[in-house]
Image (cartoon, grey):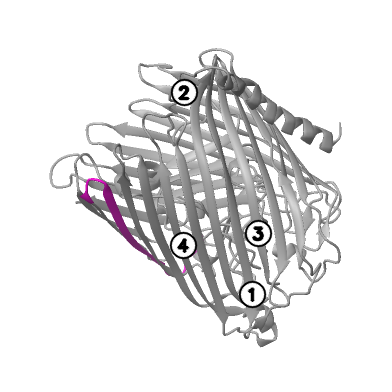
């Protein structure tokens, strides 16, 4: 059966499975019921066919992550690429996302913060993640693979990262109307410092306000041999202002507004922010400023489970100024300035209902965006970085259908895109281009017993060409959409009171294969590629002891020899295993843990250099006194790379940090 036929069947099945079970609503009154979803960031997601991991505020607080990318590094199938410099951060999910050393994003991973795209900018040798201080996030959800990502984007072949920043209500407790929190952190490697301050208030019963400011600084880091790691020094301020006002007889209406600001002024840094040791293009001064704003209206009446409506508009502007190139002959490339603007609007509703024996949680809506990518050199358009506008309009729907032991989740997204050249861009295809994408997926979970589940999913998506790809000077014809068909299956186990009363044991095995056609690589379009692998997640948690294990193995096959004769796709990370063992001392509210990270050598290469295997060990203790003078204080002490190992991350092609002591003290007033 060809891909077109299978895609058609998948779309038909996705639509019909929802229509068949919803249709009784049209003929009878329906007794409504709320569907309560209980999530825990430490849990293994055993009740879903999609490979989803969630990191909540409590876990973020103790991770001591130095960047948004580092925050995601422990998720199976997710790899950190790039440098510790904020302009060089990137992530890779199941072999997609960051093109090691070249582009921070290959457009195959969707990233958004508060509903605004944060990872789709196209900039040569720069990272792809927008400025965000990890300490200001309350929740991050990571989708591995395209299943379910149609809610947010088409073309998310690798997956999606969806993050939300904190609100005042996340910090205020009980009847508190005011709180302040100060967090200080010291990192020995590079004498890094972090100061993060919050003020949250509820001056009126229906009004909450939050102000937060952080500043993160680091001098040059060193590796395990004591050698400097180029481009690892930085200083970045970040600010967040938000407010929420609720109104109406039952406070069913709400308006929320937020504004974020991030900045990095970097002097004499390597032009290649992703791989600072690659100094062929020399050094530059780089100033990066990012502004984001979001306005959201919500309507969620307590007496109507059919309505949970949100309407949001968002804006992001990223300005990158590069100057003082150390090699003047490359200035037309290295001194290119970027002025990127992203506008977005989204309307969605969630309806919870029952149709006979079926329980539904139905999400549906529309969204649209305009992305202007402007690059210039000495005030003129840049020949190597074409100007263009991408306009998208989309409709989406997802229905979680529960029938006894069976859960079905069809998702579909229809997306229209128009790309047009700006400011006289004539390179490459050089003309307006319109395309249409469809992203259907279907997930199924069946509970064989009260503890054991089997699951499977199939997902199709189109990735539409980008401004940079379409107007690349080497492109002579209009590029076709890239397509992917992903299959995934597995088994999961979830047992509460497994050995002792109140303990938890969870495990999940996922096996997947992602088949890509019309794969775009710069000016060329290959025929076929394939990525396949498996992931293992396990967790045991009792009152005084816990352990977690994960393993990810990914293989990427270049079936058209697009990247040479090796037959391997170039940006697939090495096999990785993580094992954590910890113990708790409830009397003192103390937690002590040890983590071992094992990376295999990577010799399945085509364009990047081979790297050897390594093991890194990390130690952490968390203390949260509940009484006395230190009540409301959190203390975290960690040692990363305990044995000061020198190692090289395959995707970064850079040595990692040597032994690093970290001390974090946070106090709530």
Queried whether the magenta region covers residue 375, the answer comes back as no
**Is there a contact, CB below 8 Å, between mark 2 and mark 3?**
no
- Distance, label 2 to label 3, CA atoms, is 47 Å
Mark-to-mark CA distance, 1 and 4: 20 Å
Compared with 521, 498 (above or below) is above
Residue extent of the magenta highlight: 203-223
Mark 2–mark 4 CB contact (< 8 Å):
no
Query: Residue 505, which numbered label?
Result: 2
The residue lying at 78 percent from left, 55 percent from top is 520
Q: Earlier in the sequence, mark 1 or mark 4?
A: 4
The answer to whether residue 276 is seen in the rendering is: yes
Q: Give the secondary structure at mark 3.
A: strand
Observer-side mark, 3 or 1, equals 3
Q: Mark 2: which secondary structure?
A: strand
Name the residue rendered at 77%, 61% in the picture. 433
Where residue 635 appears, as percent x and y from the top left, is 28, 48
């Amino acid at each position: 059966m060809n891909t077109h036929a299978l895609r058609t069947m998948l779309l038909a099945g996705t639509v019909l499975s929802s229509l068949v079970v919803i249709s009784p609503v049209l003929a009878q009154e329906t007794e409504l019921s709320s569907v309560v979803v209980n999530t825990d960031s430490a849990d293994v997601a055993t009740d879903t066919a999609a490979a989803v991991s969630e990191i909540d505020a409590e876990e973020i607080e103790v991770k001591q992550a130095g960047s948004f990318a580092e925050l995601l590094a422990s998720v199976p199938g997710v790899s950190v690429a790039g440098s510790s410099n904020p302009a060089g951060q990137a992530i890779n999910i199941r072999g997609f996302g960051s093109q090691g050393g070249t582009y921070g994003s290959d457009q195959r991973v969707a990233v958004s913060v508060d509903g605004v795209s944060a990872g789709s900018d196209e900039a040569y040798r720069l990272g792809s993640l927008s400025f965000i201080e990890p300490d200001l996030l309350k929740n991050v959800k990571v989708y591995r693979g395209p299943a379910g990502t149609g809610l947010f984007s088409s073309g998310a072949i690798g997956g999606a990262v969806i993050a939300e920043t904190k609100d005042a209500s996340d910090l205020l407790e009980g009847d508190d109307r005011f709180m302040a929190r100060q967090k200080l952190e010291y990192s020995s490697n590079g004498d890094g410092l972090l100061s993060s301050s919050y003020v949250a208030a509820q001056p009126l019963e229906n009004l909450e306000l939050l102000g937060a400011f952080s500043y993160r600084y680091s001098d040059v880091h060193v590796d395990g041999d004591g050698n400097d790691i180029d481009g690892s020094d930085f200083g970045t301020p970040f600010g967040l202002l938000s407010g929420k006002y609720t109104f109406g007889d039952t406070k069913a209406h709400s308006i929320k507004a937020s504004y974020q600001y991030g900045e990095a002024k970097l002097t004499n840094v390597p032009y290649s922010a992703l791989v600072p040791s690659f100094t062929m293009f020399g050094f530059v001064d780089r100033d990066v400023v990012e502004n984001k704003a979001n306005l959201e209206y919500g309507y969620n009446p307590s007496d109507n489970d059919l309505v949970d409506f949100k309407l949001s508009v968002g804006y992001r502007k990223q300005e990158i100024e590069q100057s003082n190139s150390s090699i003047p002959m490359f200035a037309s490339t290295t001194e290119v300035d970027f002025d990127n603007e992203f506008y977005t609007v989204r309307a969605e509703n969630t309806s919870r209902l029952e149709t006979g024996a079926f329980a539904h949680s139905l999400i549906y809506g529309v969204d649209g965006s305009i992305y202007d990518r402007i690059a210039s050199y000495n005030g003129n358009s840049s020949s190597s970085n074409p100007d263009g506008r991408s306009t998208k309009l989309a409709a989406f729907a997802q229905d979680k259908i529960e029938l006894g032991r069976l859960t079905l989740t069809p998702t579909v997204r229809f997306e229209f895109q128009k790309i047009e050249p700006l400011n006289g861009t004539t390179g490459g295809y050089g003309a307006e281009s319109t395309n249409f994408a469809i992203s259907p997926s279907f997930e199924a979970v069946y509970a064989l017993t009260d503890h054991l589940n089997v699951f499977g999913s199939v997902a199709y998506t189109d990735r539409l060409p980008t401004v940079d790809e379409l107007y690349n000077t080497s492109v002579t014809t209009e590029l076709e959409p890239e397509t992917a068909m992903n299959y995934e299956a597995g088994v999961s186990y979830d047992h509460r009171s497994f050995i002792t009363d109140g303990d938890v044991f969870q495990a999940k095995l996922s096996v997947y294969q992602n088949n890509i056609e019309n794969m775009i690589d710069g000016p060329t379009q290959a025929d076929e590629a394939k990525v396949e692998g498996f992931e293992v997640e396990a967790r045991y948690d009792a009152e005084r002891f816990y352990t977690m294990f994960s393993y990810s193995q990914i293989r990427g096959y270049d079936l058209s020899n697009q990247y040479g004769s090796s037959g391997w796709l170039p940006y697939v990370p090495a096999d990785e295993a993580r094992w954590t063992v910890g113990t708790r001392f409830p009397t003192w509210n103390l937690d002590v843990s040890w983590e071992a990270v094992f990376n295999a050598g990577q010799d399945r290469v085509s364009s990047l250099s081979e790297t050897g295997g390594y093991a890194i060990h990390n130690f952490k203790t968390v203390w949260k006194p509940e009484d006395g003078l230190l009540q409301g204080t959190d203390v975290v002490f960690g040692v990363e790379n305990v044995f000061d190992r020198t190692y090289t991350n395959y995707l970064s092609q850079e040595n990692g940090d040597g032994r690093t002591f970290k001390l974090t003290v946070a106090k709530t007033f």
